[in-house]
Amino acid sequence: MLAAYARALGGDRPLENLEIGERPTPQPGPGQVRVRMRAVTLNHHDLWTLRGVVGAPITVPRILGCDGVGTVDEYGPDRPPGTPDPGSEVLIYPMRFCGRCRACQGDDPMLCRSFTLLSDGDMEGSLAEFVIVPALHVLPKPASLSDAQAAALAVSFLTAYRMLFVKAALRPGSRVLIQGAGGGVGTAAVQLASAAGCIVFASSSSKAKLDVLAGLGAQHVIPAGRDAAKTILALTEGEGVDAVIETVGEATWGTSLRAVRRGGKIAVAGATTGPNPPADLARVFWHQLRIVGSTMGSLPEFRDLIAFVERARIKPVIDAVYPLSRARDAFAMLDSNTHIGKIALTIP
Ligand SMILES: [Zn+2]
Protein backbone atom coordinates (compact mmCIF):
# COMPACT_ATOMS: atom_id res chain seq x y z
CA MET A 1 0.00 0.00 0.00
CA LEU A 2 1.08 3.62 -0.53
CA ALA A 3 2.21 5.44 2.62
CA ALA A 4 4.09 8.53 3.79
CA TYR A 5 6.73 7.41 6.27
CA ALA A 6 9.89 8.43 8.08
CA ARG A 7 12.89 6.49 6.73
CA ALA A 8 15.20 8.13 9.31
CA LEU A 9 14.85 10.45 12.32
CA GLY A 10 16.60 13.69 13.25
CA GLY A 11 19.55 15.29 11.42
CA ASP A 12 19.91 18.76 9.93
CA ARG A 13 17.20 18.39 7.28
CA PRO A 14 14.35 16.48 8.92
CA LEU A 15 11.96 16.97 5.96
CA GLU A 16 14.34 14.84 3.88
CA ASN A 17 13.57 11.93 6.21
CA LEU A 18 10.10 11.81 4.65
CA GLU A 19 9.55 9.08 2.07
CA ILE A 20 6.44 8.33 0.00
CA GLY A 21 6.32 4.74 -1.17
CA GLU A 22 5.09 1.20 -0.64
CA ARG A 23 4.70 -0.38 2.81
CA PRO A 24 3.15 -3.78 3.66
CA THR A 25 -0.65 -3.75 4.09
CA PRO A 26 -1.32 -4.43 7.81
CA GLN A 27 -3.59 -7.22 9.12
CA PRO A 28 -6.02 -6.54 12.00
CA GLY A 29 -5.45 -8.63 15.14
CA PRO A 30 -8.00 -9.58 17.83
CA GLY A 31 -10.11 -6.59 18.88
CA GLN A 32 -8.71 -4.46 16.06
CA VAL A 33 -10.13 -2.92 12.91
CA ARG A 34 -8.49 -2.04 9.60
CA VAL A 35 -9.65 1.30 8.21
CA ARG A 36 -9.27 2.25 4.55
CA MET A 37 -8.13 5.87 4.87
CA ARG A 38 -9.65 8.76 2.91
CA ALA A 39 -8.31 11.94 4.56
CA VAL A 40 -5.72 12.85 7.19
CA THR A 41 -4.68 16.28 8.48
CA LEU A 42 -1.08 17.07 9.38
CA ASN A 43 -0.07 17.88 12.94
CA HIS A 44 3.11 19.33 14.40
CA HIS A 45 3.56 15.89 15.94
CA ASP A 46 4.39 14.62 12.42
CA LEU A 47 7.19 17.20 12.10
CA TRP A 48 8.51 16.41 15.58
CA THR A 49 8.68 12.72 14.60
CA LEU A 50 10.78 13.55 11.51
CA ARG A 51 13.03 15.62 13.82
CA GLY A 52 13.44 12.57 16.05
CA VAL A 53 11.54 14.10 18.98
CA VAL A 54 9.02 11.40 19.92
CA GLY A 55 6.83 10.68 22.94
CA ALA A 56 7.36 6.92 22.88
CA PRO A 57 10.41 5.33 21.22
CA ILE A 58 9.88 4.30 17.59
CA THR A 59 11.79 2.41 14.92
CA VAL A 60 12.03 3.36 11.23
CA PRO A 61 10.55 3.00 8.71
CA ARG A 62 7.55 4.45 10.52
CA ILE A 63 4.33 5.59 8.82
CA LEU A 64 3.40 9.13 9.93
CA GLY A 65 -0.05 10.61 10.56
CA CYS A 66 -2.03 10.80 13.80
CA ASP A 67 -5.63 11.50 12.80
CA GLY A 68 -7.98 10.55 10.01
CA VAL A 69 -11.24 9.60 8.37
CA GLY A 70 -11.95 6.52 6.29
CA THR A 71 -14.21 3.52 5.86
CA VAL A 72 -14.25 0.34 7.93
CA ASP A 73 -12.44 -2.28 5.85
CA GLU A 74 -12.16 -5.42 8.01
CA TYR A 75 -12.29 -6.47 11.67
CA GLY A 76 -9.87 -8.92 13.24
CA PRO A 77 -11.15 -11.75 15.48
CA ASP A 78 -13.44 -10.84 18.42
CA ARG A 79 -15.22 -7.86 16.81
CA PRO A 80 -16.90 -5.99 19.70
CA PRO A 81 -20.70 -5.69 19.49
CA GLY A 82 -22.09 -2.34 18.32
CA THR A 83 -19.08 -1.39 16.18
CA PRO A 84 -19.75 0.18 12.74
CA ASP A 85 -20.28 -2.30 9.88
CA PRO A 86 -17.67 -2.69 7.13
CA GLY A 87 -18.13 0.10 4.59
CA SER A 88 -19.23 2.64 7.24
CA GLU A 89 -17.61 6.10 7.17
CA VAL A 90 -15.67 6.54 10.41
CA LEU A 91 -13.57 9.01 12.34
CA ILE A 92 -10.62 7.53 14.22
CA TYR A 93 -9.97 8.19 17.92
CA PRO A 94 -6.20 8.05 17.65
CA MET A 95 -5.14 6.94 21.14
CA ARG A 96 -4.53 3.52 22.65
CA PHE A 97 -4.34 2.74 26.39
CA CYS A 98 -3.13 -0.21 28.46
CA GLY A 99 -6.63 -0.61 29.92
CA ARG A 100 -5.29 -2.07 33.20
CA CYS A 101 -3.49 0.67 35.16
CA ARG A 102 -5.04 2.88 37.87
CA ALA A 103 -5.54 5.75 35.40
CA CYS A 104 -7.29 3.48 32.88
CA GLN A 105 -9.49 2.00 35.59
CA GLY A 106 -10.12 5.47 37.05
CA ASP A 107 -11.67 8.57 35.56
CA ASP A 108 -8.86 9.84 33.29
CA PRO A 109 -7.15 7.31 31.01
CA MET A 110 -5.17 10.21 29.49
CA LEU A 111 -2.94 9.77 32.57
CA CYS A 112 -2.13 6.16 31.52
CA ARG A 113 1.67 5.83 31.59
CA SER A 114 1.65 3.73 28.42
CA PHE A 115 -0.85 5.65 26.28
CA THR A 116 0.14 5.70 22.63
CA LEU A 117 -0.83 8.08 19.82
CA LEU A 118 -1.01 6.86 16.21
CA SER A 119 2.55 6.81 14.77
CA ASP A 120 4.12 6.55 18.28
CA GLY A 121 5.42 3.47 20.07
CA ASP A 122 4.50 0.34 18.10
CA MET A 123 1.54 1.95 16.27
CA GLU A 124 1.91 2.78 12.59
CA GLY A 125 0.36 6.10 11.58
CA SER A 126 -2.59 6.95 9.38
CA LEU A 127 -0.87 8.52 6.32
CA ALA A 128 -1.41 5.35 4.31
CA GLU A 129 -4.08 3.48 2.41
CA PHE A 130 -4.83 1.41 5.54
CA VAL A 131 -4.35 1.77 9.29
CA ILE A 132 -5.00 -0.56 12.24
CA VAL A 133 -6.67 0.79 15.41
CA PRO A 134 -8.60 -0.70 18.36
CA ALA A 135 -12.07 -1.67 17.10
CA LEU A 136 -13.73 0.48 19.79
CA HIS A 137 -11.84 3.56 18.57
CA VAL A 138 -13.79 4.17 15.34
CA LEU A 139 -16.83 6.45 15.57
CA PRO A 140 -19.38 7.46 12.93
CA LYS A 141 -18.06 10.38 10.86
CA PRO A 142 -20.17 13.54 11.42
CA ALA A 143 -22.34 13.87 8.31
CA SER A 144 -22.13 17.68 8.34
CA LEU A 145 -18.36 17.72 7.74
CA SER A 146 -16.14 16.91 4.77
CA ASP A 147 -13.55 14.15 5.20
CA ALA A 148 -10.75 16.68 5.79
CA GLN A 149 -12.84 18.74 8.24
CA ALA A 150 -13.77 15.65 10.24
CA ALA A 151 -10.15 14.45 10.32
CA ALA A 152 -9.19 17.74 12.01
CA LEU A 153 -11.30 16.86 15.04
CA ALA A 154 -9.17 13.97 16.29
CA VAL A 155 -6.01 15.84 17.33
CA SER A 156 -6.33 19.62 16.95
CA PHE A 157 -9.94 20.00 18.06
CA LEU A 158 -9.72 17.38 20.80
CA THR A 159 -6.57 19.02 22.19
CA ALA A 160 -8.28 22.43 22.16
CA TYR A 161 -11.48 21.04 23.70
CA ARG A 162 -9.71 19.50 26.70
CA MET A 163 -7.59 22.62 27.27
CA LEU A 164 -10.58 24.99 27.16
CA PHE A 165 -13.35 23.08 28.89
CA VAL A 166 -11.60 20.45 31.06
CA LYS A 167 -8.23 21.89 32.10
CA ALA A 168 -9.03 25.64 32.05
CA ALA A 169 -12.72 24.88 32.93
CA LEU A 170 -13.94 27.91 30.98
CA ARG A 171 -17.59 28.95 31.03
CA PRO A 172 -19.73 31.19 28.82
CA GLY A 173 -18.50 34.73 29.43
CA SER A 174 -14.97 33.68 30.44
CA ARG A 175 -12.15 35.64 28.86
CA VAL A 176 -9.55 33.51 27.09
CA LEU A 177 -6.35 34.39 25.23
CA ILE A 178 -5.39 31.93 22.49
CA GLN A 179 -1.72 32.19 21.54
CA GLY A 180 -0.63 31.20 18.02
CA ALA A 181 -4.29 31.28 17.12
CA GLY A 182 -3.72 30.74 13.39
CA GLY A 183 -2.46 27.17 13.83
CA GLY A 184 -4.44 23.94 13.95
CA VAL A 185 -5.07 23.89 17.71
CA GLY A 186 -5.36 27.70 17.75
CA THR A 187 -8.12 28.00 15.15
CA ALA A 188 -9.92 25.07 16.80
CA ALA A 189 -9.73 26.83 20.18
CA VAL A 190 -11.04 30.11 18.68
CA GLN A 191 -13.99 28.32 17.06
CA LEU A 192 -14.86 26.18 20.10
CA ALA A 193 -14.46 28.96 22.70
CA SER A 194 -16.43 31.40 20.57
CA ALA A 195 -19.27 28.89 20.04
CA ALA A 196 -19.34 28.29 23.82
CA GLY A 197 -19.86 32.01 24.50
CA CYS A 198 -16.37 32.85 25.76
CA ILE A 199 -14.79 36.22 25.04
CA VAL A 200 -11.91 35.30 22.75
CA PHE A 201 -8.62 37.17 22.45
CA ALA A 202 -6.69 35.67 19.50
CA SER A 203 -2.99 36.36 19.06
CA SER A 204 -0.87 35.79 15.96
CA SER A 205 2.24 37.28 14.36
CA SER A 206 0.49 37.35 10.97
CA LYS A 207 -1.86 40.20 9.98
CA ALA A 208 -3.54 37.96 7.37
CA LYS A 209 -4.23 35.31 10.02
CA LEU A 210 -5.66 37.90 12.43
CA ASP A 211 -8.18 38.95 9.77
CA VAL A 212 -9.33 35.33 9.37
CA LEU A 213 -9.51 34.84 13.16
CA ALA A 214 -11.84 37.81 13.52
CA GLY A 215 -14.13 36.09 11.02
CA LEU A 216 -14.03 32.89 13.11
CA GLY A 217 -15.45 34.64 16.16
CA ALA A 218 -12.50 36.21 17.99
CA GLN A 219 -13.72 39.47 19.62
CA HIS A 220 -10.20 40.84 19.91
CA VAL A 221 -7.30 40.07 17.58
CA ILE A 222 -3.89 40.87 19.05
CA PRO A 223 -0.66 41.19 17.04
CA ALA A 224 1.94 39.00 18.80
CA GLY A 225 4.94 40.84 20.20
CA ARG A 226 6.16 43.15 22.94
CA ASP A 227 2.94 45.13 23.33
CA ALA A 228 0.53 42.17 23.26
CA ALA A 229 0.16 41.86 27.06
CA LYS A 230 -0.27 45.63 27.46
CA THR A 231 -3.01 45.63 24.80
CA ILE A 232 -4.85 42.76 26.52
CA LEU A 233 -4.63 44.42 29.95
CA ALA A 234 -6.03 47.63 28.44
CA LEU A 235 -8.94 45.66 26.98
CA THR A 236 -9.71 44.00 30.35
CA GLU A 237 -9.67 47.03 32.68
CA GLY A 238 -6.14 46.06 33.73
CA GLU A 239 -7.30 42.70 35.07
CA GLY A 240 -6.15 40.21 32.42
CA VAL A 241 -7.83 37.14 30.94
CA ASP A 242 -9.18 34.17 32.92
CA ALA A 243 -7.12 31.68 30.97
CA VAL A 244 -4.48 31.37 28.26
CA ILE A 245 -4.32 28.58 25.68
CA GLU A 246 -0.60 28.13 25.11
CA THR A 247 0.97 25.93 22.41
CA VAL A 248 3.69 28.28 21.16
CA GLY A 249 6.17 28.20 24.07
CA GLU A 250 9.26 30.40 24.21
CA ALA A 251 8.00 33.09 21.79
CA THR A 252 4.80 33.82 23.74
CA TRP A 253 5.32 32.58 27.32
CA GLY A 254 6.23 36.02 28.70
CA THR A 255 3.04 37.49 27.24
CA SER A 256 0.99 34.61 28.63
CA LEU A 257 2.31 35.23 32.18
CA ARG A 258 1.58 38.98 31.98
CA ALA A 259 -1.81 38.77 30.23
CA VAL A 260 -3.47 36.29 32.60
CA ARG A 261 -5.37 37.60 35.64
CA ARG A 262 -4.34 36.89 39.23
CA GLY A 263 -5.32 33.31 40.02
CA GLY A 264 -5.89 32.62 36.31
CA LYS A 265 -4.84 29.53 34.41
CA ILE A 266 -2.38 28.89 31.62
CA ALA A 267 -3.14 25.61 29.85
CA VAL A 268 -0.12 24.26 27.95
CA ALA A 269 -0.33 21.61 25.23
CA GLY A 270 2.66 22.37 23.05
CA ALA A 271 5.78 24.48 22.55
CA THR A 272 6.35 24.88 18.82
CA THR A 273 8.98 27.62 19.35
CA GLY A 274 10.79 25.79 22.16
CA PRO A 275 10.01 24.35 25.62
CA ASN A 276 12.29 26.35 27.93
CA PRO A 277 11.28 30.02 28.35
CA PRO A 278 12.24 31.82 31.59
CA ALA A 279 9.83 30.49 34.25
CA ASP A 280 9.39 33.88 36.02
CA LEU A 281 8.50 32.03 39.23
CA ALA A 282 8.11 35.27 41.20
CA ARG A 283 5.16 36.21 39.01
CA VAL A 284 3.77 32.67 39.22
CA PHE A 285 3.57 32.70 43.03
CA TRP A 286 2.89 36.39 43.58
CA HIS A 287 -0.04 36.32 41.13
CA GLN A 288 -1.01 32.79 42.23
CA LEU A 289 -1.10 31.52 38.67
CA ARG A 290 -2.10 27.96 37.81
CA ILE A 291 -0.13 26.32 34.99
CA VAL A 292 -1.78 23.13 33.80
CA GLY A 293 -0.43 20.67 31.26
CA SER A 294 -2.81 19.04 28.78
CA THR A 295 -2.44 16.35 26.14
CA MET A 296 -5.03 15.19 23.62
CA GLY A 297 -8.31 14.12 25.27
CA SER A 298 -10.22 11.05 26.45
CA LEU A 299 -12.71 9.03 24.40
CA PRO A 300 -15.72 10.47 26.32
CA GLU A 301 -14.33 13.99 25.69
CA PHE A 302 -14.00 13.09 22.00
CA ARG A 303 -17.66 12.04 21.86
CA ASP A 304 -18.70 15.29 23.60
CA LEU A 305 -16.55 17.32 21.19
CA ILE A 306 -18.14 15.68 18.12
CA ALA A 307 -21.64 16.34 19.47
CA PHE A 308 -20.75 19.98 20.23
CA VAL A 309 -19.20 20.57 16.77
CA GLU A 310 -22.33 19.18 15.08
CA ARG A 311 -24.71 21.08 17.36
CA ALA A 312 -22.83 24.38 16.98
CA ARG A 313 -22.32 23.82 13.23
CA ILE A 314 -18.58 24.41 13.52
CA LYS A 315 -16.62 23.83 10.31
CA PRO A 316 -12.88 23.24 10.91
CA VAL A 317 -10.68 25.50 8.79
CA ILE A 318 -8.83 23.59 6.05
CA ASP A 319 -6.23 25.76 4.31
CA ALA A 320 -5.02 23.30 1.66
CA VAL A 321 -5.67 19.77 0.46
CA TYR A 322 -2.98 17.65 -1.21
CA PRO A 323 -3.07 14.08 -2.51
CA LEU A 324 -0.90 11.65 -0.49
CA SER A 325 1.57 11.52 -3.38
CA ARG A 326 2.34 15.22 -2.71
CA ALA A 327 2.94 14.79 1.01
CA ARG A 328 6.32 16.54 0.69
CA ASP A 329 4.60 19.78 -0.38
CA ALA A 330 2.13 19.47 2.49
CA PHE A 331 4.89 18.94 5.08
CA ALA A 332 6.89 21.87 3.66
CA MET A 333 3.81 24.08 4.04
CA LEU A 334 3.35 22.98 7.66
CA ASP A 335 7.03 23.60 8.40
CA SER A 336 6.88 27.10 6.89
CA ASN A 337 3.92 28.01 9.15
CA THR A 338 2.30 30.04 6.38
CA HIS A 339 -0.99 28.13 6.60
CA ILE A 340 -4.05 28.89 8.69
CA GLY A 341 -5.96 26.03 10.32
CA LYS A 342 -5.21 22.61 8.94
CA ILE A 343 -3.42 21.08 5.94
CA ALA A 344 -5.11 17.90 4.71
CA LEU A 345 -3.97 14.97 2.65
CA THR A 346 -6.42 12.83 0.69
CA ILE A 347 -5.79 9.17 0.01
CA PRO A 348 -7.19 8.04 -3.34
ZN1 LIG B 1 -3.32 2.46 31.43
Image (cartoon, rainbow, N blue to C red):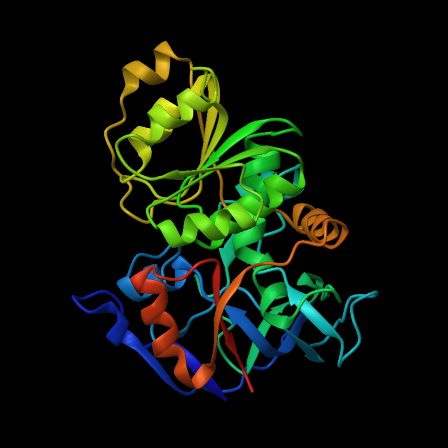
User: In which quadrant is the C terminus drawn?
Assistant: bottom right
Q: Residue at x 68, y 78 (%)?
A: 71
Does residue 278 appear left or right of residue 299 in this picture?
A: left
Looking at the image, residue 196 lies above or below residue 78: above
- Whole-percent x and y of residue 162? 58, 41
- Whole-percent x and y of residue 320? 47, 71
Q: Nearer the viewer, residue 302 or 61?
A: 302
- Give the image quarter of residue 196: top right
Q: Residue at x 61, y 35 (%)?
A: 166
Q: Is residue 123 visible?
A: no
Looking at the image, residue 217 lies above or below residue 58: above
- Give the image quarter of residue 49: bottom left
Q: Is residue 193 visible?
A: yes
- Whole-percent x and y of residue 250? 27, 39
- Whole-percent x and y of residue 173? 64, 27
Does residue 175 appear left or right of residue 303 in this picture?
A: left
Q: Residue at x 70, y 70 (%)?
A: 90
